[in-house]
Each structure stands twice: as C-alpha cells, then as structure tokens.
C-alpha cells in the first residue's frame, strides 16, 4: 500500500493529501456554518449526566437555537458555568427582567432535588441570558451522542479514528 | 511445428473460458523466448487486482503520461494546477477560520466566520465544477512537435473497457481541433495475472493517435500487415482461427471414432 503511495509523483501526492484535507475542512466549515446560523458557539451538544431524566438520558444528542432571546419558564436551556467549560442542560424555573432590563434566569434539573444555585460560580445567583446561555433545546436524537461520550472518556480513540480515516482517504483512489 | 500448434490451441481455449486471456501466449511462436519475455514483464511492473475496474483504470492512467513523457512530449499541468489551487485555497480559508475561532472564541469572530463559511463553499463549488465539467477525465495535456494533444479517459461501471478521447491539432492548422474516440478492453495490455504490459499499450496509442504515432513511429502497427513491419501487433490474430478449428476437428474426430468402436462392441 505504502509503496503505491511512494510511486506517485508530487502533484498526485498533493492531490491525495488535498482529498483528506477537504474532508476535514468541509466537516469543520459545516459545523461553523451551523454555528453561525443558530448563533450558538456549540449548536449540537451531548447530554452527559442524568439530571434531566426522564426527559433526556445520558448520550442523547441535543440541537440548540440561540436566536430566541425571550426565554420562557419551562424552556430547556444549555449554559456554561462562568469560569468552567462544562455545558449544563437544565430547565428554566424562574425569570427576572426582560424587555428593557437584562433577562436573568434560574434553572433546575428535572431529576435534581434543588435548583442550580449551588452549581453557579461563587457569588453568582442567576444566569445572564445573553452571556451565559448558549442556546435553548429545539430537538433531540436519543443515543447517538454516546460516541462522543466514549471519545471524551478515552481520548486516544480520537487519534485512532482520525488516523484511520486519514489513511483510508489518502491511500484510496476510487 | 508442434510448438506452434500448442501455442495457438492454448490461446483459443482460454479465450472461451474466461474474458481475460493470457497475453503472453501470442507474443512469439517460439515457446522458449516467450517464457523469457513473461519473466521480464513480471519483474518490471506491480501486480494489479484484475477484477477491480478502478485499479485497472488508475494503472493505465498512470502509465499514459509516463509513456508520453518518455517520448519527450512536453506535458502541460494547467488543469491539475488549477484544481490544486482551488482546493488548497479552500483548505487555507478553513484553516485560518479554525485558528482565529480557537484563539479568540466564537463571539468575537462570529461576523468574519460567517463570511469565511460563505467563501469556503463558493470555493468548494468552483473546485467541484472544475473537476466535473472542465477536467472531465483528462489524463494528459501537452504538445509534441507543435501539435497540441489532450487525452481524456473514462470507464463505464463494471465494464472493463477503456475509453480514450484524444483531441489534437496539426502544426499546419493550430486552431483546428480533431477528435478521435477509442476504446479497447483492458485485456489488451493486462495479463490474466494482473501485470501491466507496456508494449501493447504503447502500440495501441501510437497506432490510433496520429501525433503519438509521429513521435514514436516504431510502435505504429497496422492490423492488415502493412506499415513498419518491425513490430508485431500484440493480440490474438483473427486470421489464424481456421487452422486452429481444423486442429480441433481432427482431435474430436479421433475421439468420436474410438467411442463409436466401443459402442459397436457392446451392441
């Protein structure tokens, strides 16, 4: 296999590498395009914990929309805790402000006993809709996100998958 | 005399059983030198999976510019260069977007990311259009002795026939394009084992495409028997079929005779 690769001339080798680069960059650009359309930095997230059962199970894939800025009580939002990079999926239980003043939200997981005040950063009692929330859930697919959970728990899987994909694309000439 | 008969029988028999006939048999009438030639072929080129159409086509497509550049035909890489340029430009756009998004975060780069995504898909569209409409299967572009030459190849799904379209100009009329459409089964230059044999391929190209024939007159072969005479066409000659059929008739006649004697004895 590799001997077939070494017998290629420079232009042909460049063309094969280009195929792989285009696969990666198209995937990335599609993701960024979706990001821009939904106005959310991460338009598709995976549920990592069981705090929203029975509505969402661990491993569900959620689709977010961030252009509905007047979030109502009962909507499910995804937010980042200030200072940490972990997105949390919970339901809005209280809202303050809105209209001319900043909209602030209090959230609580369906399967949790207490609201999220403990989870927020020190000194933070409410979420700021425009700064902390990255979107509200508009749809979901169950189970599909388990692959992402596996990839984050075993990070070497990512390298292996990427390596295999790269090898097959560069070496085949279908 | 016996060796000659043996060669011809072998070639017709396997032609019946299999689409792919061993090419080495019809090369020469002398069985010894035939073995030497086959040994030479096997060491020179890598083995190809004979039932994989894409392998056959890719090997042939790779051999074509090699042969032409060995004839000192100047190769023009324009089409490949444009394709690589469009493709890598798109990749660079996506790379830059990734870098800025990673370092500055989504909110700050939102506006520029939107434009980058649009630019990327426009470039990707141009790239796809270039491959699909303009390149259209081009495998070689160049010029020889003032004649421009373009070669396009294609195959149809699951049919092992190589279609080659050649467009060329003559030095006296540089803006007049002539077109020749050729097809040949891959069996013409691949052995049953999957080895690529350069000679029949080169002869086919030189005989059918005039500018190549002019650059390589030694390989021009005509089926009728006229022409250079120094090289022989490398495939089964239809003219020798009669002798082979006679030989088969004799052999089966002998067999039928002995069976008839046996049955008479039984009765």
Image: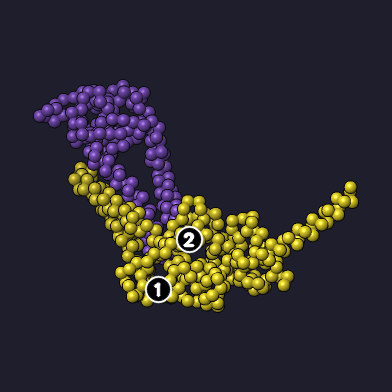
Chain colours: A purple, B yellow
Seen as rendered, the residue at the extreme top is A113
Drawn side of residue A118 relative to residue B183, left or right: left
* Image coords of residue B116 (percent x, y): 23, 49
Q: Quadrant of the N terminus of chain B?
A: bottom right
User: Which residue in the protein does label 1 denote?
Assistant: B73
Circle 2 residues within 10 Å: few <14, some 14–19, many ≥20: few
Name the residue located 22 percent from the left edge and 45 percent from the top edge. Answer: B114
Drawn side of residue B17 relative to residue B102, left or right: right
Instruction: Please tell me whether residue A151 is drawn above or below residue B145 in the rendered image.
Output: above
* Image coords of residue A6 (percent x, y): 45, 64
Name the residue located 89 percent from the left edge and 47 percent from the top edge. Answer: B267
Instruction: Please tell me whether residue B197 is drawn above or below residue A110 in the rendered image.
Output: below
Between B232 and A149, which is closer to the camera in this rendering?
Answer: B232
User: Which residue in the protein does label 2 denote?
Assistant: B183
* Image coords of residue B164 (percent x, y): 44, 61
* Image coords of residue B91 (percent x, y): 30, 54
- Give the quadrant of residue A147: top left
- Give the quadrant of residue B153: bottom left
Helix, strand, or loop for circle 2?
strand
Name the residue located 52 percent from the left edge and 59 percent from the top edge. Answer: B185
Between A118 and A169, which is closer to the camera in this rendering?
Answer: A169
Between the residue at mark 2 and the residue at mark 1, the CA separation in whole angstroms equals 22 Å
Between A62 and A9, which is closer to the camera in this rendering?
Answer: A9
Numbered marks: total: 2
Q: Is residue B98 visible?
A: no
Q: Earlier in the sequence, mark 2 or mark 1?
A: 1
**Which subunit holds the residue at mark 1?**
B
Instruction: Please tell me whether residue B44 is drawn above or below residue B258 in the rendered image.
Output: below
**Which subunit holds the residue at mark 2?**
B
């Amino acid at each position: 296999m590799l001997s077939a690769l070494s017998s290629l001339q420079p232009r042909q080798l460049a063309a094969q590498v280009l195929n792989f680069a285009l696969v990666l960059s198209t995937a990335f650009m599609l993701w960024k395009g979706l990001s821009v359309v939904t106005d959310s930095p991460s338009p598709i997230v995976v549920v990592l914990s069981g705090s929203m059962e029975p509505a969402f199970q661990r491993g569900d894939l959620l689709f977010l929309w961030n252009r509905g800025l007047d979030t109502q009580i009962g909507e499910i939002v995804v937010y980042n805790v200030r200072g940490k990079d972990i997105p949390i999926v919970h339901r809005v239980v209280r809202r303050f402000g809105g209209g001319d003043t900043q909209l602030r939200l209090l959230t609580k997981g369906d399967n949790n006993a207490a609201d999220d005040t403990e989870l927020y950063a020190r000194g933070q009692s409410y979420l700021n809709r425009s700064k902390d929330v990255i979107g509200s859930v508009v749809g979901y697919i169950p189970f599909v996100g388990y692959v992402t959970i596996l990839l984050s728990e075993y990070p070497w899987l990512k390298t292996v998958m990427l390596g295999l994909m790269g090898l097959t694309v560069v070496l085949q000439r279908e | 005399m016996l060796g000659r008969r043996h060669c011809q029988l072998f070639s017709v028999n396997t032609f019946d059983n299999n689409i792919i006939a061993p090419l080495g048999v019809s090369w020469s009438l002398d069985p010894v030198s035939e073995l030497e030639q086959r040994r030479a072929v096997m060491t020179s080129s890598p083995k190809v999976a004979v039932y994989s159409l894409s392998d056959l086509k890719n090997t042939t497509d790779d051999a074509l510019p090699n042969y032409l550049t060995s004839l000192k035909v100047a190769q023009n890489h324009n089409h490949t260069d444009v394709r690589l340029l469009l493709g890598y430009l798109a990749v660079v756009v996506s790379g830059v977007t990734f870098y800025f998004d990673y370092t500055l975060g989504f909110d700050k780069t939102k506006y520029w990311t939107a434009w980058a995504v649009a630019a990327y898909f426009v470039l990707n569209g141009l790239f796809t259009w270039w491959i699909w409409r303009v390149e259209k299967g081009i495998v070689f572009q160049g010029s020889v002795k003032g004649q421009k030459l373009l070669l396009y190849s294609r195959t149809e799904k699951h049919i092992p026939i190589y279609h080659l379209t050649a467009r060329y100009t003559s030095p006296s009329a540089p803006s007049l394009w002539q077109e020749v459409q050729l097809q040949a089964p891959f069996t013409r230059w691949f052995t049953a084992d999957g080895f690529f044999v350069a000679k029949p391929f080169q002869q086919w190209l030189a005989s059918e495409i005039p500018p190549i024939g002019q650059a390589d007159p030694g390989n021009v072969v005509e089926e009728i028997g006229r022409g250079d005479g120094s090289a022989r066409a490398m495939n089964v000659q239809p003219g020798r079929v009669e002798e082979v059929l006679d030989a088969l008739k004799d052999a089966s006649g002998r067999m039928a005779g002995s069976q008839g004697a046996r049955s008479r004895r039984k009765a």
